[in-house]
Image (spheres, rainbow, N blue to C red):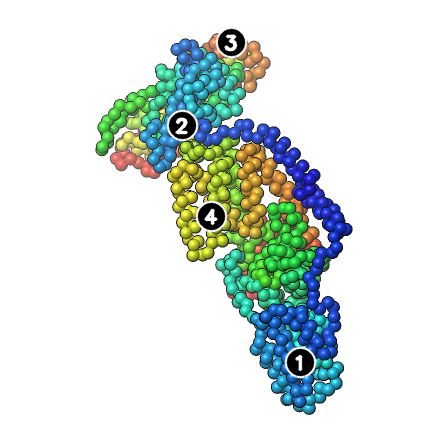
């Protein structure tokens, strides 16, 4: 149904956009000061143009100076205050031109303009990263992206000097995906720091970072990361295409990208994963996934994202498999409890009282005695109150947070039961399904929506509705795709080899191959027969 | 949104309203959860139904009130269903019968026949066939439902607790509706149910309480039916024999004397395993006889002070008295059933039907009344004493076997 609906909406949108295109002139683009002009020979002219383009803003710094042995050559540097590192610029650009030139080039052989540019680049400029800019657009880009522009009188080329500075958050512990055993590093807002965090883990020449610029106003750097040879080229190309297709003003967070490129925008299930842990993202890259890093956010996207990934946690692989498997089963149980527990309570107490053990039924009946609402309303009240508490707990300043929890537990939990507005079993059910919903944070939003759906279905149709509802959800999940991979892989379609890391996690030495559903081909990550064993005496091993 | 889409959504929403979803929805606080029902013959000849309905408010953990935890609702009608519907007129909640533990049947009611009652129970989707079925002897069913003595808050649970104990003390019968259904319709078998009698419970005065005279319930043997009609009762000892013969005996205690002339030589044996097989045979002349073979195992649990039970001779003697006891008990039971009750609750006819189906079809119509009371039978008992408990000899063991 969702498929048909989405196809329908797409169709409508297509028709609409065609109409719009034929009626309207093309939407006004951001006017770019450069207008494709090349750089002028005269420094003053260039300076005028830059001022015209950026000069209204106070944070632009333009500094003109003379250099050369006889101070015969004019130059200017331009950068944005706060983004450029003034010390770096002073030490390696200004100083090397104005002071060190007397040491490195004492004869002042800077007469020939064409040679002068290369001379400066090769012999004088001592900063690490300096690239050529050829026209006005590039110059403006250089300045806006935080680099420093160096222009020299008489040259039709300039330098884009990378001397970024400014304040940035240091690397801290992850706030959302906490583990006991494992790395404590989390991504930060700076794209380069994030790529370096991944590079620190995967020291492989095949790890590729491709940077694209998205967002007409924000010009956000978006970086596609993948490992050539492991990731499927078609998936990488698809990611590239979809990101290039984005035509919008603003990319403030990776969530903007997610919503523009996801496969199933009408499904409650997210088909793009996210993480703020470099080790997790690296592990996904090494399984053949593609990561999308976005400047300005510590949240990194990974595609394709399948359902079983929401059951997986980095720590699963760091600790030994026994407890891990137990906890994975608990996670599956938590999934079902979150989705169906309130619905089951409603259907059992309003339709199928004969299915409840007698003692429990009498307890339920005793708790419901004198409650003025039907079970459905009772459930909705307590579920919505919980959502209120949760939402206010997140949005509130931390100092007030304790007040919320006190009000939440005391007033809602205890007083509501004592006043006879909500039954005690209902509070337990709500609390339990709330606790379990936090066990699977990555599909939390889908679960909450579907939980309410199940509540309504069960109150109308009883257990029959619960079963039909579960089947519908399952069928919908099986119909989803994420960048060419079935969402339910490897459970549906079943893939025995990939099942080693799904509901159960087999020991690492058994998981020989990378997930085929992701790489689209058989590829092995290690040799077989790696199970640790006693030294073999026959083969001359020592008995330790 | 597109107009078409809006139209589709509106149609879906409107047609969903026509669906009859919640037709059998009933909230917990609209239900009167019945835990037991009693059926009696009313004074006006109608069926009198007594429902024992839980009062949930009294079951609350905090401040659970001083009100009794259950309420007895009496109504009457020409059929059971009518009586159930009539309760609504005088009781504020709709009775809900899925959690009934026990169905108590008054003696008068049972003598008139339980066929219609069983029919109603099997037809109803609320009542379960695994409910205990029991006859109230010498009193009305409604009297039984009002008596409570044990620890359970709800009287039905008290009755169920007693009925379940039949497994560890098999000198009384306890059967469920399903057992009744199995044995009632076929030829060559007849139903047996348990019997509740009202007794006076002597309460020992403890600190802070006054001695009081209270009523209680007791399982007193079994009620025998001929087809669906009650014909009579067996006492506990005969019921033990009946249970042995029908394979329903699980555990019981038996007192035997090591020396038949010495009352002081009593040994108590716990019967732990007993098996009974009945083999019918028809001679050429058409005489029907049954060979009953019983195998039993037991443990000694109590030995009079001076018996040296480690003495093999004495041990054998006790064992032979043990099998003798079982033989005498079962023999007496069969005689009693043949002579007084004239109903084949032992299932002898059923074994005959399996082995000689042709002869059976000729005699089955007069089996219960004419043939069964006069068939001959033999009882063979083989017993085995296993253990003497944690100790072997009593402290001052002197007597040994002769």
| Disc 1 secondary structure class | strand
Q: On the image, numbered disc 3 is attached to which residue?
A: B366
The answer to whether mark 1 and mark 4 are in CB contact below 8 A is no
Residue at (53%, 53%) from the top-left corner? A324
Q: Which residue position is annotated with label 2?
A: B54
**In the image, residue A298 above or below residue B38:** below
Would you identify the image quadrant in which residue B358 lies? top right
Pointer 3 and pointer 2 on the same chain: yes
**Residue nearer the viewer, A445 or A228:** A445
Quadrant placement of the N terminus of chain A: top right
Q: Position of residue B205 (x, y in %)?
A: 23, 29
Q: Which residue is mark 1?
A: A75
Q: Quadrant of residue B150?
A: top left
Q: How many marks?
A: 4
**Distance Cα–Cα, label 4 vs label 3:** 78 Å
Q: Cα distance, mark 1 to mark 3?
A: 129 Å
Q: Which residue is painted at 75% across and 82% down in the image? A: A114
Q: CA distance from mark 4 to mark 2?
A: 37 Å
Whether callout 1 and callout 2 share a subunit is answered no
Upstream in sequence: badge 1 or badge 4: 1
* Cα–Cα gap, marks 1 and 4: 61 Å
> Foreground mark, 4 or 2?
4
Q: Is residue A232 left or right of residue B289?
A: right
Using the image, determine if residue A296 lies above or below residue B365. below
Question: Which label number is shown at residue A389?
Answer: 4
Q: Secondary structure at mark 2?
A: strand
Which residue is at a point 39% across and 38% down the rendered structure image?
A: A419
Labels 4 and 3 share a subunit? no
Q: Quick check: marks 1 and 3 in contact, CB under 8 Å?
A: no
Secondary structure under the numbered disc 4 in the rendered image: helix
Q: Chain of mark 2?
A: B
């Amino acid at each position: 149904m969702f498929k048909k609906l989405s196809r329908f909406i797409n169709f409508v949108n297509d028709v609409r956009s065609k109409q719009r295109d034929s009626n309207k002139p093309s939407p006004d683009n951001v006017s770019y000061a450069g207008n494709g002009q090349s750089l002028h020979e005269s420094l003053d002219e260039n300076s005028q143009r830059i001022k015209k383009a950026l000069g209204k803003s106070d944070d632009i710094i333009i500094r003109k100076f003379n250099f050369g042995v006889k101070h015969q050559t004019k130059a200017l540097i331009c950068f944005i205050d706060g983004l450029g590192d003034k010390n770096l610029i002073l030490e390696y650009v200004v100083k090397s031109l104005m002071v060190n030139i007397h040491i490195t080039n004492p004869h002042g052989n800077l007469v020939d303009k064409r040679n002068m540019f290369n001379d400066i680049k090769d012999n004088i400029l001592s900063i690490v990263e300096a690239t050529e800019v050829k026209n006005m657009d590039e110059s403006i880009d250089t300045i806006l992206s935080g680099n420093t522009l160096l222009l020299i009188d008489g040259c039709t080329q300039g330098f884009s000097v990378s001397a970024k500075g400014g304040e940035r958050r240091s690397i801290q512990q992850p706030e959302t995906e906490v583990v006991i055993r494992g790395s404590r590093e989390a991504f930060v807002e700076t794209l380069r720091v994030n790529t370096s965090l991944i590079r620190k883990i995967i020291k492989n020449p095949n790890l590729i970072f491709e940077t694209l610029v998205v967002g007409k106003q924000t010009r956000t750097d978006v970086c596609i990361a993948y490992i050539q040879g492991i990731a499927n080229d078609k998936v990488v190309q698809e990611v590239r295409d979809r990101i290039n297709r984005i035509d919008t003003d603003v990319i403030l967070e990776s969530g903007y990208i997610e919503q523009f490129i996801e496969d199933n925008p009408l499904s409650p299930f997210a088909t793009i994963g996210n993480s703020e842990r470099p080790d997790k993202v690296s592990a996904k890259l090494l399984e053949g996934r593609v990561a999308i890093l976005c400047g300005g956010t510590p949240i990194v996207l990974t595609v394709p994202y399948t359902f079983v990934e929401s059951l997986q946690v980095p720590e699963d692989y760091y600790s030994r498999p026994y407890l891990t498997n137990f906890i994975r089963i608990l996670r599956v149980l938590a999934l079902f409890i979150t989705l169906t527990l309130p619905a089951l309570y409603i259907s059992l107490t309003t339709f199928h009282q004969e299915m409840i053990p007698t003692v429990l039924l009498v307890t339920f009946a005793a708790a419901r005695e004198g409650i003025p609402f039907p079970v459905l309303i009772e459930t909705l009240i307590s579920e919505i109150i919980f959502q209120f508490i949760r939402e206010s707990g997140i949005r509130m300043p931390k100092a007030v947070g304790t007040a919320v929890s006190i009000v939440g537990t005391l007033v809602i939990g205890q007083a509501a039961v004592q006043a006879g507005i909500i039954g005690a079993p209902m509070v337990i059910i709500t609390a339990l399904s709330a606790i379990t919903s936090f066990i699977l944070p990555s599909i939390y939003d889908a679960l909450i929506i579907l939980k309410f759906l199940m509540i309504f279905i069960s109150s109308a149709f009883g257990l029959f509705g619960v079963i039909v509802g579960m089947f519908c959800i399952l069928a919908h999940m099986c119909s989803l795709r994420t960048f060419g991979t079935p969402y339910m892989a490897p459970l549906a379609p079943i893939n025995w080899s990939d099942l080693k890391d799904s509901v159960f996690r087999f020991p690492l030495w058994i998981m020989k191959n990378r997930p085929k559903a992701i790489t689209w081909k058989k590829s092995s990550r290690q040799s077989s027969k790696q199970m640790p064993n006693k030294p073999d005496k026959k083969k001359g091993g020592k008995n330790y | 949104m597109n107009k078409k889409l809006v139209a589709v959504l509106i149609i879906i929403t409107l047609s969903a309203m026509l669906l009859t979803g919640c037709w059998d929805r009933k909230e917990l606080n609209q239900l009167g959860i019945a835990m037991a029902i009693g059926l009696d013959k009313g004074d006006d000849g109608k069926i009198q139904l007594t429902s024992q309905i839980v009062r949930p408010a009294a079951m609350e953990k905090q401040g659970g009130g001083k009100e009794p935890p259950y309420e007895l609702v009496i109504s009457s009608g020409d059929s059971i269903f009518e009586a159930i519907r009539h309760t609504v007129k005088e009781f504020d909640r709709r009775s809900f019968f899925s959690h009934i533990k026990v169905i108590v049947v008054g003696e008068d009611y049972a003598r008139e026949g339980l066929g219609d009652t069983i029919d109603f129970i099997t037809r109803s989707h609320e009542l379960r066939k695994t409910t205990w079925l029991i006859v109230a002897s010498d009193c009305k069913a409604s009297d039984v439902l009002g008596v409570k003595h044990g620890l359970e808050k709800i009287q039905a649970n008290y009755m169920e607790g007693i009925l379940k104990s039949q497994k560890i003390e098999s000198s009384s019968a306890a059967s469920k509706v399903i057992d009744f259904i199995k044995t009632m319709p076929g030829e060559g078998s007849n139903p047996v149910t348990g019997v509740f009698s009202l007794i006076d419970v002597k309460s020992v005065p403890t600190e802070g309480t006054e001695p009081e005279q209270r009523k209680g319930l007791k399982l007193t043997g079994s009620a025998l039916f001929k087809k669906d009609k009650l014909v009579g009762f067996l006492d506990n000892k005969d019921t033990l024999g009946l249970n042995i013969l029908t394979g329903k005996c699980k555990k019981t205690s038996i007192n035997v004397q090591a020396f038949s002339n010495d009352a002081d030589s009593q040994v108590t044996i716990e019967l732990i395993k007993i098996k009974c097989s009945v083999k019918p045979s028809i001679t050429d002349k058409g005489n029907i006889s049954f060979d009953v073979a019983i195998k039993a195992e037991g443990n000694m649990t109590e030995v009079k002070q001076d018996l040296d039970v480690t003495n093999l001779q004495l041990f054998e003697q006790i064992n032979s008295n043990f099998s003798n006891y079982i033989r005498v008990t079962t023999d007496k039971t069969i005689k009693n059933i043949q002579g007084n009750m004239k109903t084949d609750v032992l299932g002898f006819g059923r074994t005959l039907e399996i082995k000689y189906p042709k002869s059976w079809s000729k005699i089955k119509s007069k089996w219960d009344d004419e043939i069964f009371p006069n068939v001959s039978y033999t009882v063979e008992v083989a017993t085995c004493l296993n253990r003497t408990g944690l100790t072997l000899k009593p402290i001052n063991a002197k007597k040994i076997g002769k």
